Structures are given as C-alpha cells and as structure tokens.
Image: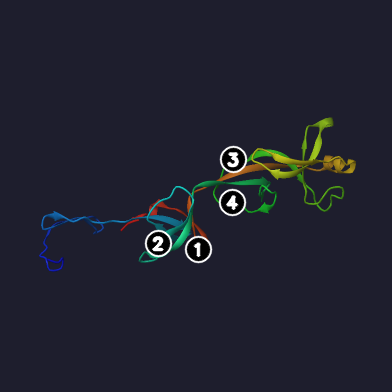
Amino acid sequence: MSFWSANYNITKLKKNGMGEIEYLELNGQEVPLKTVDLYAWKYSSSYIYTKELFKVDTENVTTYGGNPIAKATTGDYVAAHTNDIWKIGTTFYTDEMVSTTAPAGTAGIAKKIAEVYIATSEDTDLIEGTWYTSTGTGASIKYYEVDGLEKTGVTLGDEITDGEAVAALAAATFSELKYVSYAEGEKIVYDSHDYYRYSDRDITL
C-alpha cells in the first residue's frame, strides 16, 4: 500500500508557541520530524547561513541566503585570529613599514617597542622615507637604519657612520613606535564582504 492510499490518522500533535510542530503521531506511531540548524553570519544588515560550524580555515564552504532561504554560492571561512599592526601617532604601518589603514578586529593594548624617525625631503643629509632608530645613550649612542618591524622591536639595518647624517639624527625628533594586536572573530568572506558569526540569528527549519 502506498503512502498516499493508506489511511493515516493524527493521533497526537504538539505545536510550540510559534505554531511549529514539535511532536507528531500517526496511527499511534511517532513520526520523526527532521530539522535543519542554520548558523548565521552577519555583514552590516545582511545575513548568510551555513549548515555547519568550522574550526580551521576552509575554502568554498556552502552558504545559504535569500528570502525564503535558498542555496547561495560559496565563501571562504577564516578562523578567529589576530591582525598585527604598528603605529606612530595615529598612522598605521605594516611590518614592512608601509602605511596602511586600521585592521579589522578589536584593538589590544598598544605597546611601545622603539623610538624611530622617518626622514623627510627636508633632511638633506638623510635618505627621504628611510626609517632610523638608535641604541645606547649619551656618548655611546649609535644610529641605524630600520630594516623591518617586529612585535617586540625593530630589525636593525646598517649603522649610520657619516658625521653629517649622525648630526642630523641627533637633532631630529624621534617618535614612539607601538605594536598593537587586533583580535578578529571568525568570519566567512562572501561576495567580497566579511560576514562575522552572529548566533542571535541562528534558525532551525
């Protein structure tokens, strides 16, 4: 006997406050109710959903969106991580000393790691755009070019030995260089936007 020709009677039915069926019996037999959990990810006022959560960076995860929710395309999952940045005043720099914008995430405590000076076009005895730092104090002070930035200090390059360049650096005003770590939550990069986990909009179908 086919399903459609059988004589089925609802012997027990329970709904929740939203009118959704929570329990169903036909002819005294419980009918399994299949549900699907969808996990929400938010960008601005837009949402996408996945059927699973992830722990490691994963490319091409299936996402769902729309109204009603239908299969969308794919996105790349990026696990929670930190973004490293360096600052002089309000200006941000990469570890290669290139100016950039503030990274995504929540800023931690900025920590001073060095005193630096960036030469300008007015510094005729220095190389414009070059970063400089010093070690020691007083008569033992030495000046160096900066080759790179690290979390706890700078990578020293060549020592400055030219007398005029040393005099220019001695007269220059050095600035505090700080390292900051920005904590960024897990996200899915979809359609060129970052969708962050947003459990408040999780749904069950």
Q: How is the image coloured?
A: rainbow
Mark sitting earlier along the chain (4/2): 2
Q: Residue tagged by mark 4?
A: 103
Q: Which mark is residue 64?
A: 2
Quadrant containing the C terminus is: bottom left
Tell me which amino acid carries mark 4. Pro
> Which residue lies at the image location 81% right of the left edge and 43% below the top edge?
172
> In the image, is 99 to the left or to the right of 162?
left
Residues at discs 1 and 4 in contact (Cβ within 8 Å): no
CA separation in Å, label 4 and label 2: 27 Å
Mark sitting earlier along the chain (2/1): 2
Closer to the observer: label 2 or label 3? 2
Q: Residue tagged by mark 3?
A: 109
Mark sitting earlier along the chain (4/3): 4
CA separation in Å, label 2 and label 3: 37 Å
Q: Is residue 190 above or below residue 177?
A: below
Q: Local crowd at mark 3 within 10 Å, few (<14), some, or many (≥20)?
A: few
Closer to the observer: label 4 or label 2? 2
Q: Local crowd at mark 1 within 10 Å, few (<14), some, or many (≥20)?
A: few
Q: Is residue 32 above or below residue 82?
A: below
Tell me which amino acid carries mark 2. Tyr
Expressed as whole percent of the image width and height from the top left, the position of residue 39 reads 38, 54
Quadrant containing the N terminus is: bottom left
Residue farthest to the bottom?
A: 5
Closer to the observer: label 4 or label 3? 4
Q: Residue tagged by mark 1?
A: 191
CA separation in Å, label 1 and label 4: 19 Å
Quarter of the figure with residue 183: top right
Tell me which amino acid carries mark 3. Ile
